[in-house]
Image: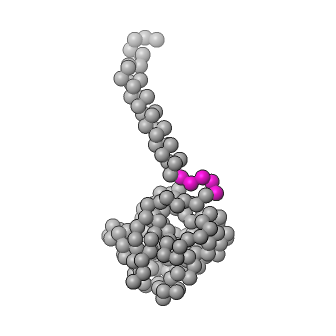
Amino acid sequence: MPPWAAPSMKNIVSRFVLAIGLTACALHAQAQAPAAGQPQLGLQRTTITAGMYLIDAQLALSPREREIGLMHRKDMPAQEGMLFVFEQPATQCFWMRNTLLPLTAAFVADDGTIVNLADMKPMTENSHCSEKPVRYVLEMNQGWFAKRGLKAGARLTGQPFRAAK
C-alpha cells in the first residue's frame, strides 16, 4: 500500500470512537425499547388538564413509540393515558392491533381542543380517524371522557398544547 493510502492514526482513532459511540446509542435504544410482546411503560410523562381533571399522560413522541402505543397493556389506572405527538397536523388514524384495553381516542387540535372522540374495541384493526388534521391523539380508558362530560369542543391544557403555537 502506498504511504499516502495508509490510514493515519488520527483516522483510525476517529473511526474507533465513532464505532463506540454508535454501539452505545444502539444499546441505549435497545434498553429503552420494550421486549417484543411487552408494554412500554417507561416513556416520558406530562400532566394534562381536562377541566378540573388531571391526566398523567405518557408521551409517544417517536415513530416507534407511536407504533407500539398502548399495545400489550393489561390495565391502566383511570387517570392515566397516552398522548401521541406528531410532527405536524394531519388526518390521524388509529387501530387496536395487540391492544388489550378498550380505549377512547381524543383527536386534539394544536390549541388543545378536542376535534372528535372515537371508542375503540380491543384487538381489532378497524380504523378510527380524526375528522380534520390534528397533531395530537390522547388515548384513555374507554368511557373516561363520557363519564366526565367531555365531548368534541372541550379544551385540554398542558405543556404540549402551549408548545405547538
Front-most of residues 135 and 64: 64
Figure coloring: one colour
Count up the numbered dots: 0
Q: Is residue 99 above or below residue 13?
A: below
User: Which residue ends up furthest to the top in the rendered image?
Assistant: 2
User: Would you identify the image quadrant in which residue 112 lies?
Assistant: bottom left
- For the C terminus, the image quarter is bottom left
Q: Is residue 27 above or below residue 102?
A: above
Residue 146 x %, y %: 52, 86
Front-most of residues 141 and 105: 141
Write the residue at 52% across / 76% down: 78
User: Would you identify the image quadrant in which residue 87 lies?
Assistant: bottom left
Residue 36 in magenta? yes
Write the residue at 43% across / 37% down: 21
Front-most of residues 106 and 43: 43
User: Which residue ends up furthest to the bottom in the rendered image?
Assistant: 149
Q: Main secondary structure of the magenta part?
A: loop
Residue 86 in magenta? no
Residue 12 x %, y %: 41, 23
Q: Is residue 158 visible?
A: yes
Q: Is residue 161 visible?
A: no
Relative to 79, 125 lies left or right: right
Residue 49 x %, y %: 39, 77
Which stretch appears magenta?
33-37
Residue 122 x %, y %: 65, 72
Relative to 4, 152 lies left or right: right
Write the residue at 40% across / 67% down: 46
Relative to 15, 75 lies left or right: right
Write the residue at 52% across / 61% down: 41
